[in-house]
Amino acid sequence: MRGVVPGALDLARDAFARNAWDEAYRHYTDAASGQLPHEDLHRFAIAAGLCGRKAESIEVYARAYREALARGEDLAAARAAFWAGHVLFFEGGMSRASGWWARGRQLVEAYGDDCVERGYLLIPRGLENFFGGNPSVTEAVTKEVIAIARRFGDADLLAIAGHGHGRALIRLGRIAEGMEALDEVMLAVASGETTPAITGDVYCGLLEACREVSDLRRAREWTGALSSWCERQPELVRYRGPCLIYRAEVMQLAGAWGEAFEEARRACEWLTSPATPEGPADAFYRIAELHRLRGAYDEAEEAYRQASRLGRPPEPGLPLLWLARGRADAARAALQRALAEDNGADPARRAGLFDAAIQVMIALGDTAAATAATAELESLVARVGSSFLQATASRARGAVLVAAGEAEPALRPLRAAWAGFHRLEAPYEAARVRVLVGTALRHLGDQESAAMEFDAARQIFEQLGAGPDLRKVDALLHPSPAGAHPGPGGLTAREVEVLQLVAGGLTNREIATALVISEHTVARHVQNMLAKLGFASRTALAAYAVEHGLATP
C-alpha cells in the first residue's frame, strides 16, 4: 500500500458506505497514488460513475484490469473488463464496449473452469440481442446466467440477469410472466441485496418496462422506491434526472399537474448538465404534454420540437396538438407515418399512437378508419393485458360507436373505461370518458343524466387546469331543447347545439370533436345558420345566441 495518503483509504471506504459518492471519489483519488485492492478499485469506479464522472469511472476499471493482469489474477481482470464495457455500452460507446467484453471473454475461456465471471461475460450477448430485436435469444441467455448467479450466490449478477430475463419475456408477449420476474428483481434491489453498481440501472430498467406496458400500479410503486433511493444520496448525479421524469409521468396521470410540471422542469435542467449521462429529450416531451393539456399551445409546440431535435419522437403528442389547432389532416398524416414506422417493441407507445389516430379519424368523420384502428388497438391490448391500456381501448371503442350514431351500445365500453381509469386513479382520463358518456346519453334523449356527466367532468377539468377540455364541456353543459320543434330563427335542435359551441368560441374542429361529428358536418350547419339568419360572420352568430338566451356573454 506504498504511496497511499494516510487514512485516505479508510475515509474513502467510510464515505462509500454512506453513499457519499463525491466524497468517496475524492478520498479514493487521494488513495489511488498507491496500489489499491481490486475491491476498492471497483468501489472507486462506482463512486466516479454515480457522481457524474463517466470518463474517470472507465479509466479506473481499465486500471483495475491492467493491475489484475499484472498480478496474474485473470478472473479479476475479466470482471473489470465486463464493468468497463458495461459503462461504455450505456454511454453509447458500443465499439469500445465490445472490445472490453472480448478481452474479458478471452480470459474466462482461458481459465477453463466454470466461474461466476463467465455469467457476467454472457450478459453482453443478452444485451446485444435485446437491443437488436432478438428477445428469444436474450431470454435463453439470461436464463443460463440466472442459474450461474444462483450457483455462485452473486446477487448483482442475479439482479442483472433477472432484469434482462423479465424484459425479454415482455418483448416476447409473455407480459404477466415478465412482470412477475421483474417483481422478484425489484424485491432484491429494494431490500438492499445489490450493490450501487447496478441498483440504479435496474430501477430505471424496471420503470421502462412499466412504461412499455402501461403498468400504472407498478410504476407508482417503483417510482416511489427509486425516488427514495435517490433522495438518500444527495451527491448522486446519475439516475436523478430519469427519476424526475418518471415522477412527472406518474404525477400527471394522478392529476397533480402542477407538481408534474415542476418535476419535468427540474429534470430538464438536471439532464442538460454535462455531468449527466442521460439527455433531456424525455423531459422536454413531458413539458410539452402538460402545456398542451393546459392549452398553452405555442409553448407546447416549441417543447415538442425541442424533444424532437434531441431525438425523442414527438408523436403522439404533437399530432394531438395539431388536431386541437385545426390541422387534422397534418395530424392524421403524422400518426399514419409513425404507426407504419413503429416496430411494436414498445406496446404502450403503439397503443398511444392508435389512440391518438382514432381521435383524429373521428374528428375527420372517418368512422370506418377509426373502427379499423380500434380493432387493432384492442388486439394489441389483449396481448399486453395492461389495465390502463384496456381502459384506453374501451374508451376508443365507445367513442367510435358514438361517432357512428350507436349511442346505446357505446355505453357499455364507456362505463368499463371509466371504471378502469377510476380504479387507477387517473382523473383526467376518467373525465374524458364522462364527456363521451354524456354525449351518448344526450343522443339518447336523456338530457338530465348527460348534464350530470358533463358537470362531473367539468369539476375535474377545472381542478386540473385543463383549459381546452373545460371550454368544450362548458359549452356542452347548455344543451339545446330536445324534440322536433325548431329553435329561434327556424334553427334545428342540432343547429342550436352547434350555435352554442360557436358562441363558446370553439373552432369547427373543436365543435366536431365535442359533438363527435365530422368537421364537414359542422361547417354545413354553420353555413345553414348563416343563411337562415341572414348573417355573414361567426361573430354575428355568437351575438345572436347571447341575445336569444342560448349562451352567456
Image (cartoon, grey):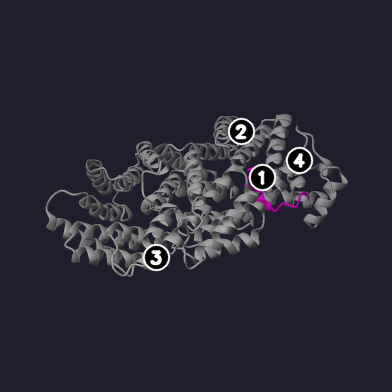
Residue under circle 4? 492
* In front of the other: 191 or 324: 191
Whole-angstrom CA distance, mark 2 to mark 4, is: 20 Å
Residue under circle 2? 407
How many tags in the picture? 4
Whole-angstrom CA distance, mark 2 to mark 3, is: 58 Å
Tell me where the magenta segment starts and ends, as one range. Answer: 504-519
Residue 522 in percent (x, y) is at 68, 49
The reply to whether residue 194 is visible in this rendering is yes
Residue under circle 1? 514
Q: Amino acid at mark 2?
A: Ala
Residue under circle 3? 54
Of the two numbered discs 2 and 4 on the same chain, state the one appearing first in sequence.
2
Q: Nearer the viewer, mark 3 or mark 4?
A: 3
Residue 220 in percent (x, y) is at 51, 42
Local SS, label 1: helix
Q: Quick check: 546 above or below 7? A: above
Residue 139 in percent (x, y) is at 27, 45
